[in-house]
Amino acid sequence: MVLQRSISLLMLLCSSPLVFAAGNSTNSTEACDRRCLANSLVEKELFSPPQDDNCTIVVNITSIIYQMLSFDTKAMEMTSRIKINMEWMDPDLGWMHKRYKFSTIVLPVDKIWIPGLVLENSVDVTVEPYSKDVQVRRDGTVTHAVVLFTTVSCEINLFSYPFVTGTCPVAINGWSQKSCELKLQISDNVSSIASSGGEWQTSNVIKHVDPSQRVYLEVELSINAFGAVVTLILPSVLIMLADLVSFALPFEGGERNSFKVTLVLSFTMFLLILNDHLPNGGNCSPLLHYHFSFCLVCLVVSMLTSIVLTRLSVEDSFLLCRRRSAKVHPSNNSKTQHDSLDQEKDIGVITTQSGDLASEVASLQKIANFLENLEKGEEEKQRKVAFAYRLDRFCYAFFQSIYIIYVIIIISITQTDICKVNNLDFWDNSDHGDDDYDYTPL
């Protein structure tokens, strides 16, 4: 009996440390909360990417939200805000279900490895985390979101500006080296926020995959043509219409010439003011540049035509070198003839008083010749004016025909696809190292 009690007491003393240790282990597991688990994962310092046997890291882009901020028509650059939601697997961040009952935890974004993205056609990129924390699931799946503020170079066909629609690519891909790569699997869940970058508007954003399995976002853009029509096209059309109507003004007094000179100066100032606002268009220069050049040439030709007609209304030739020196101006001729008439009258009076009939007849003959010459001079003047007006009607009809033909040609040209651009020529098909890519750490 005593022996049995001694054996039982010995077994109880031997089993007490194991029970105590198991109890402490159970209590320590239950006492470790989410924060404790997060701290233990942070202490691992997992700043390098997870690497499997084939050295390929797969990142799933679950959704993309695109918003255009601005479009610089002069420099052909588009600035955008892109929110990217992504997931990837990092087995070292997982934990056992039996030991920790939590399904998800939150870790600081700067304490673990975050994948970087490559923007092939970017000019400038700024990356901001959507949140300073990432969510990690039990199996090691990490969920994260970033916001990209990117400026990309975009070549758009502006030949028919401001009636323009075009596309601008935004190439978002993973980096690739000779043996390792970061592979992005971008879903079709791409949406856009309605925005307006000045006169430009975003109509749609579509994900595309080229034959080389490279992914890019195709942003469809259009222009609100009302502002450009009011500030660019309408003033030029009104000035040309005013020049055409100015043919109704008489050109004898010089009013028409002054008006046409004013139109030319006004149009020149109009072009100087708009010089910094007109788009360059890259390889496809806008047709608007040629339109303004045509309008300026027509205005100058119309002004010179009016000046020549004014010259022809008083002279037989519009060239100064061919002006006849012997010809006396009508006003001077009339003055001379009036002086001769006064002299003849005085002679006639003296002759009549002296009773010389022959001298009186001669004086009357001279008076008749003077009146006849005066009438011929007036007829010559009317003939020149009539000839100038006939030329004026011909010039009016000529300019009117030119403008109608020009409008038909412009409408026909804008309906055809003359100029084409390739805005996907930025791809680099060779293998590169880290320094050859616009690698953007997130």
Image (cartoon, rainbow, N blue to C red):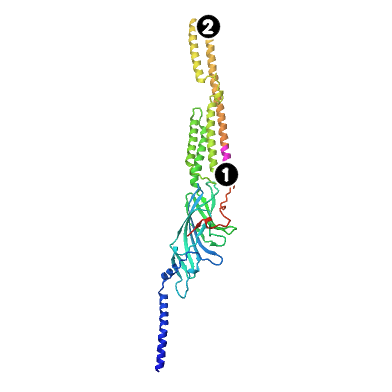
Residue 273 image offset from top left, x and y in percent: 47, 40
Q: Which residue is mark 1?
A: 411
Residue 56 lies, in percent from the top left, at 55, 64
In the rendered image, which quarter is residue 428 located in? bottom right
**Regarding mark 1 in the picture, which secondary structure is present there?**
helix
First along the sequence among labels 1 and 2: 2
Q: Position of residue 236 (x, y in %)?
A: 51, 40
Residue 276 location (% of width, % of height): 48, 43
Name the main secondary structure of what is drawn in magenta.
helix
Looking at the rendered image, the disc whose residue lies closer to the viewer, 1 or 2, is: 1
Q: Label 1, label 2: how many angstroms apart (C-alpha)? A: 82 Å
Residue that extends furthest to the bottom in the rendered view of this protein: 1
Q: Which residue is mark 2?
A: 357
- Name above or below for residue 132 compared with residue 201: below
Chain part drawn in magenta: 402-413
Check the picture and name the quadrant holding the N terminus. bottom left
| Type of the residue with mark 2 | Leu
Give the amino acid at mark 1: Ile
Please determine whether, in this image, residue 439 is positioned above or below residue 7. above
Query: Visible in this render: residue 170?
Result: no
The answer to if 129 sits in the magenta stretch is no
